[in-house]
Image (cartoon, rainbow, N blue to C red):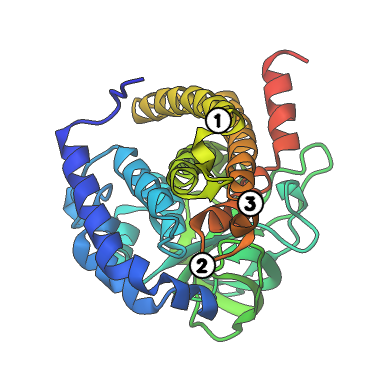
């Protein structure tokens, strides 16, 4: 089906990103995978390219384009090449939303120059060893100093994407005890300087996939955070997280759909070239039927994703619809990529083939930003169940 979600500006931007990936990423991506993270220089190059400023308001140095479609183009092009920009998607696709919505003008003027250039990379720290989908169970805490000039932060986080390279981290912490009737109250967001005394980056976690996207454990031992670095209102972080999980799930839906589409392209190319019993693998009826099934599923996921993207840009994408999107697209991606890997035979299990990378990278999409089981609960609640 013909897509209508993008205009000429988006397609011109697509060309720029595609060229950048071909020149700066694909030739060296294997080296980044071996290292387990991208070089810091990549973020400077993305800053120079203007990628970090697309959605930043003009008064703070950005392009002021209030649309998530440019982020979607980036994710589609990364999937097409089976590569990543490390944790840059967290920087722009997630953290920027929090900053734009809740930061004061003074905070934006202080933080945006480094954000735009890539000199200051951002991450967000929600998950803890004992608190994943249950964000109300967060134990990391901060208390106000006696003179009221700073918060004193203590605790630990895990599974923090971009945690190794991060210069500032949006830390979800408890700043007041939760009342028994509502465990969600009393959480706040602090924008913490990762170079502050007492801030420590622990293990860089070794993952099945997304190996160039550094994921780390973080700890805080009496870290002093100026009161000026509280993001939004004290005690309102849970509502902020709930609001922004919509865009996080949109991001995952876009990436999952793009990855599934890329898997079909890789399978088409491989099966046309690979011969078995004197015939191309693509000529067998089983191959044709499998790819036809995959194409139909991906088309449905694409229509759903494009609709969600349009709704988000006009502020109408609901939490339940974002949950539907994440559930459907990630399940489709899992099925499609698995089938496309099977069509590669033994070579599909070899990491030098992009289908293997997609297979490993996409598995986590059914887990993070709320497991798909949680998505079903959100949808069921929307149904009145």
Look at mark 2 in the image and give the residue it sits on: 162
> 134 left or right of 170?
right
Query: Are dots 2 and 1 in contact, CB under 8 Å?
Result: no
Look at mark 3 in the image and give the residue it sits on: 345
Counting residues from the start of the chain, the first of labels 2 and 1 encountered is 2
Q: Residue furthest front?
A: 278
Look at mark 1 in the image and give the residue it sits on: 294
Does dot 2 land on a helix, a strand or a loop?
Answer: loop
Q: Position of residue 341 (x, y in %)?
A: 60, 48
Give the crowd class for mark 2: few <14, some 14-19, many >=20 residues within 10 Å. many
- Quadrant assignment for the C terminus: top right
Q: Position of residue 303 (x, y in %)?
A: 44, 22
Determine the CA span between mark 3 and mark 2: 34 Å
Q: Nearer the viewer, residue 343 or 352?
A: 343
**In the rendered image, the vertical position of residue 52 relative to residue 367, given as above or below:** below
Query: Are dots 3 and 2 in contact, CB under 8 Å?
Result: no
Give the crowd class for mark 1: few <14, some 14-19, many >=20 residues within 10 Å. many
Q: Nearer the viewer, mark 3 or mark 1?
A: 3
- Whether residue 260 is visible here, answered yes or no, is no
**In the rendered image, the vertical position of residue 179 relative to residue 289, given as above or below:** below
């Amino acid at each position: 089906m013909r897509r209508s979600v993008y205009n000429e500006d988006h397609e011109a931007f697509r060309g720029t990103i595609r060229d950048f990936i071909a020149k700066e990423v694909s030739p060296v991506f294997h080296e980044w995978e071996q290292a387990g993270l991208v070089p810091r220089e990549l973020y400077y190059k993305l800053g120079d390219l203007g990628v970090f400023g697309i959605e930043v308001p003009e008064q703070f140095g950005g392009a002021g384009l209030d649309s998530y479609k440019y982020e979607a183009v980036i994710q589609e092009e990364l999937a097409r090449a089976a590569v990543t920009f490390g944790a840059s998607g967290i920087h722009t696709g997630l953290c920027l939303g929090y900053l734009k919505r809740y930061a004061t003008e003074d905070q934006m003027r202080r933080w945006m120059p480094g954000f735009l250039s890539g000199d200051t990379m951002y991450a967000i720290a929600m998950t803890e060893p004992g608190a994943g989908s249950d964000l109300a169970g967060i134990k990391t805490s901060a208390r106000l100093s006696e003179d009221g000039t700073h918060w004193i932060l203590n605790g630990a986080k895990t599974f923090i994407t971009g945690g190794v390279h991060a210069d500032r981290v949006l830390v979800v912490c408890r700043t007041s005890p939760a009342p028994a009737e509502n465990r969600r109250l009393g959480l706040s967001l602090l924008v913490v300087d990762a170079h502050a005394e007492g801030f420590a980056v622990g293990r860089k976690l070794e993952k099945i996939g997304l190996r160039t996207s550094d994921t780390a454990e973080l700890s805080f031992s009496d870290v002093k955070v100026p009161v000026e670095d509280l993001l939004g209102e004290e005690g309102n972080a849970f509502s902020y997280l709930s609001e922004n999980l919509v865009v996080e799930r949109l991001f995952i839906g876009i990436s999952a759909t793009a990855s599934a589409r890329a898997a079909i392209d890789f399978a088409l190319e491989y099966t046309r070239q690979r011969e078995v019993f004197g015939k191309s693998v693509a000529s067998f009826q089983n191959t044709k039927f499998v790819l036809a099934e995959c194409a139909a599923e991906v088309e449905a996921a694409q229509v759903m994703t494009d609709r969600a993207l349009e709704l988000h840009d006009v502020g109408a994408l609901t939490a339940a619809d974002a949950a539907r999107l994440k559930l459907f697209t990630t399940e489709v991606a899992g099925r499609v990529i698995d089938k496309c890997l099977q069509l590669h035979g033994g070579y599909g299990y070899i990491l030098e083939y992009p289908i293997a990378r997609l297979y490993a990278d996409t598995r986590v999409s059914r887990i993070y930003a709320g497991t798909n089981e949680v998505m079903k609960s959100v949808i069921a609640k929307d149904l009145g169940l």
